[in-house]
Each structure stands twice: as C-alpha cells, then as structure tokens.
C-alpha cells in the first residue's frame, strides 16, 4: 500500500502511512480529523541509557533495525485535542485548525483503529498508550475517564478488537499550562489513577526542556507554569508507586539544565529525569532549535546527564533512530500540521510481521 492510501472509511481511518516502525494514520472523528500512531518498539537495550535500570552503554546513534514483536510490546499514541492552544515553538501541531477536545469515543476509536491495523496480532504482553500526539491532554477530562475505563475493560477491548492485552500502561505528558485553573486538580487526579487504579503502572511526564524561565517563556510562548509554582504542586503529589514521576527534557544544544536548581525544587525520591533530543520538525527548523549531533553521538547528553545524576536524580536518556525521526514518530510532528514523511523504507520492520507497502 502506498503512503497516504485511502482505507476502509467504516473504520474511521481516512489515510494510513506505513512507516518502518508501524503505522501513522489519520482518522475522521466527531469534530474532524485526528492522527494516531500504532507502532513497535526497539527495546531499551537499543535506545536507552539508564544506569539505575542497568543500561550503561552510551548511545552513539540508534540503528534502523527491527522492532520487537507487537506481542511483547505495542505502542499507541493518541491525539487528545483537535489542534493545540499551547502553540509551542518546537511543535507543528499548532498549525492544525483548532476544534476543541477529543471526546471519550474519539479516544476509544483511535485505540481500536490502531489495533485493527494489525489484525493478525491477537495478544500483547504490554500496550503503552501515550496521550501525546496532538493537543495538551491535561485540558481534556475525557482523557482521565478513558484511562479509568481502559483498566476496567480489557475483556471488552478483546471482544471488540480481537486483541488480548496483559498490561495496559497509559502515559500522560503535559506542558503544565499556567492559565488553567484545574491544573493542580488534574495532576493530582492522574496521580490517583497511577497509584490506585493502575497500582503504579502508569506514567506522568512533565515537559520541562529547560530550567531557564526565559528560555521556557520563548519555547512555550509564556503559557507554561513557572517551575517554582509547579514545584508547589509537586509537594502535594503522593509518593509514586513503582515508576517515579518524570521531568522530561526535550533537549536542544542551547537549552539550560541547571541540575542544582532542579533538585532544589523537585524531590529526587519522587521524580526522575528523562533526556531526549529535540526533534527535527518544521517548527524547530524554522526557529533554529536543534540538538547538534544528537542522533549520532552521545556527546550532547553527557554533561546534563552527569549533572542531574550528581544532583541525586535517576536519569534516562532516550534517543530515537533516524527511521523513527523520518517516520514522524517523535513528539512535535503532525502530518495535519504540515510535517512531511521522509522515510524511504519499503517494509514495516517489526519482528514476526511481513508487511510491505
């Protein structure tokens, strides 16, 4: 099937784009079009350095290899809004026409469509569901309702889609909007979902990117909460079960990472840090935001990683492959916002599947 080919409209999928790690697709939903990812994962030994987890190798580029079988791990990334009001300078999503929040049924349909793209897979040990494609999920109450529904309805999902899921791991990523009165309430509600509903098996990531408020004002256009104010909310967050809460740095070469400042604000017993390269989308190119050498050398990450570890944080460095970058898998991309696929691969490279375009 060719890129952008039209598929069965009764599924809600208007266009699907085969990429090396799976599918990027656009669907028709209640208020217009949303885009979603249904992809595999290479596994931590290939793309992660995290000494606290036992992964010690510095990442000098990630090979364009095969993903592990979907029966072992499946990743679905859904859109939570039609467009996004945050208008971050490193993201293509603000180019999408704003039409409000995705509904509960929109979220469910995206997941079902993602599953049905691989009808031969009837079981997965782990499905990671990221609320991160288009939109700021903290604004959308349906995200929280859907996360609760997911945990209680794995049998219903299996009956509806044919996929039996052993573990569902939802992940909410937020830029922590400053002018949202419900921010603290929603953050604490997700903590409750993580700890009490999922027994710790859910993720909460805060997009920090820089410890400089001047830089953050530029990248988030002044719409983000100040770190000191986010830290006040963090004090009210309960101790996390299992995985810690995550302070996420989509790191560009010019961004400041003051580890001592961060440690003075956030308790390293509750929070870990994640470092990824900033991604090569239209917005980053237009605004001269880049991680120099970030896809073929560990050098850009070494100092921030060492500084954060010295300040007491567990640190995970994640680097995507060029296949993932060219396939628009990475955060801040949106074909509906003008991002362009660059991948030239002819097959989907997931172990156990033989799918050609």
Image (spheres, helix red, strand yellow):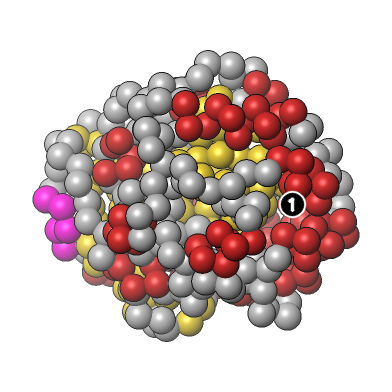
Which stretch appears magenta?
Answer: 2-6
Magenta stretch: dominant secondary structure:
loop
Look at 43% across and 65% down and name the residue there.
Answer: 89
Look at 35% across and 80% down and name the residue there.
Answer: 97
Residue 357 visible to the viewer: yes
Q: Quadrant of residue 21?
A: top left
Q: Quadrant of the C terminus?
A: top left
Q: Residues within 10 Å of mark 1 (few under 14, many from 20)?
A: many
Look at 46% across and 42% down and name the residue there.
Answer: 253
Whether the magenta-drawn stretch holds residue 159 is answered as no
Q: Position of residue 234 (x, y in %)?
A: 81, 57
- Mark 1 lies on residue: 194
Q: Nearest the camera: 136 or 357?
A: 136
Q: Position of residue 53 (x, y in %)?
A: 66, 23
Q: Nearest the camera: 142 or 243?
A: 243
Q: Nearest the camera: 79 or 281?
A: 281
Q: Is residue 302 above or below residue 239?
A: above
């Amino acid at each position: 099937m060719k890129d952008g080919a039209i598929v069965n409209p009764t599924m809600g999928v208007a266009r699907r784009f085969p990429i090396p790690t799976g599918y990027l697709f656009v669907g028709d939903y209640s208020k217009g079009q949303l885009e979603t990812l249904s992809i595999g994962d290479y596994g931590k030994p290939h793309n992660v350095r995290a000494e606290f987890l036992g992964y010690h190798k510095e990442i000098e580029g990630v090979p364009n290899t095969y993903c592990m079988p979907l029966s072992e791990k499946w990743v679905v990334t859904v859109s939570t809004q039609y467009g996004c009001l945050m208008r971050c300078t490193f993201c293509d999503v603000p180019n999408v026409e704003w039409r409000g929040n995705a509904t509960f049924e929109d979220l469910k349909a995206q997941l079902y469509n993602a599953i049905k793209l691989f009808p031969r897979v009837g079981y997965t040990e782990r499905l990671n569901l990221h609320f991160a494609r288009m939109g700021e999920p903290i604004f959308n109450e349906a995200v929280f309702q859907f996360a609760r529904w997911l945990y209680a309805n794995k049998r219903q999902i299996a009956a509806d889609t044919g996929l039996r899921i052993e573990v569902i791991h939802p992940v909410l990523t937020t830029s922590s909007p400053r002018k949202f009165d419900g921010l603290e309430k929603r953050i604490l509600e997700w903590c409750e979902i993580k700890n009490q509903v999922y027994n710790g098996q859910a993720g909460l990531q805060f997009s920090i990117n820089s410890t400089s408020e001047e830089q953050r004002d530029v990248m988030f256009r002044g719409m983000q909460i100040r770190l000191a104010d986010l830290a006040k909310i963090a004090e009210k967050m309960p101790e996390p079960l299992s995985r810690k809460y995550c302070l996420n740095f989509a790191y560009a070469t010019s961004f400041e990472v003051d580890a001592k400042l961060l440690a003075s604000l956030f308790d390293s017993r509750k929070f870990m840090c994640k470092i990824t390269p900033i991604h090569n989308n239209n917005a980053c190119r237009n605004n001269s935001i880049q991680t120099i050498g970030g896809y073929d050398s560990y050098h850009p990450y070494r100092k921030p990683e060492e500084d954060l570890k010295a300040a007491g944080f567990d640190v995970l460095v994640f680097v995507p492959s060029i296949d993932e970058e060219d396939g628009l898998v990475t955060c801040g991309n949106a074909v509906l916002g003008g991002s362009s696929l660059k991948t030239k691969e002819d097959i989907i490279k997931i172990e156990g599947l033989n799918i050609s375009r």
